[in-house]
Image: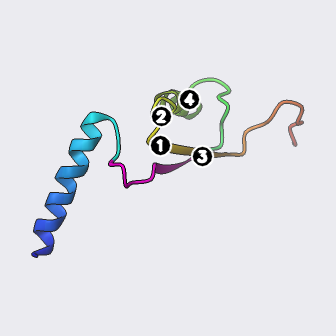
Amino acid sequence: MDESRWCRRYDDEMFRFAQQGRLPDDRSPMRILMLNYEFPPIGGGAGMAHKALLGKYARSADLHVDVLTSGRRPGLTTER
């Protein structure tokens, strides 16, 4: 089979599943790694954008999201 034809068919199939908000049964969840130096959010900007995206992603069983941050945790001090 012509590779371009296979790719097109695969993309069409995945698009159909994406429209339904799920993955085919034989697929594992999509893994996403989000990087942000300001998470949890301090004010506005990238931290708030990530928070909004994570809220949407959390509703999907077909996604596994990890967040890598250098943001402060409660109880940690800031180094000057």
> Where does the magenta region start and end?
24-35
Left or right, residue 21 beside residue 52: left
Q: Earlier in the sequence, mark 4 or mark 2?
A: 4
Give the amino acid type for the residue marked by disc 2 in the picture: Tyr
Element class at badge 4:
helix
Q: Quadrant of residue 41?
A: top right
Give the residue at mark 2: 57
* Viewer-nearest of discs 4 and 2: 2
Q: Give me the C-alpha separation between circle 1 and circle 4.
A: 15 Å
C-beta proximity under 8 Å, tags 1 and 4: no
Give the amino acid type for the residue marked by disc 4 in the picture: Lys
- Residue 33, relative to residue 42: is it above or below? below
Q: Earlier in the sequence, mark 2 or mark 1?
A: 2
Determine which of the numbered discs, if any, sits on residue 19 in the image.
none
C-beta proximity under 8 Å, tags 2 and 1: yes
Farthest-out residue, front: 25
Element class at badge 3:
strand
Percent coordinates x, y for residue 7 in the rendering: 18, 64
Give the amino acid type for the residue marked by disc 1 in the picture: Leu
Give the amino acid type for the residue marked by disc 3 in the picture: Asp
Q: Give me the C-alpha separation between circle 3 and circle 1.
A: 10 Å
Q: Give me the C-alpha separation between circle 4 and circle 2.
A: 10 Å
Q: Is residue 32 magenta?
A: yes
Give the residue at mark 4: 51
Give the residue at mark 3: 66
Q: Nearer the viewer, residue 8 or 50?
A: 8
Label 3 neighbourhood size at 10 Å, few (<14), some (14-19), many (20+)? few
Give the residue at mark 1: 63
* Viewer-nearest of discs 3 and 1: 1
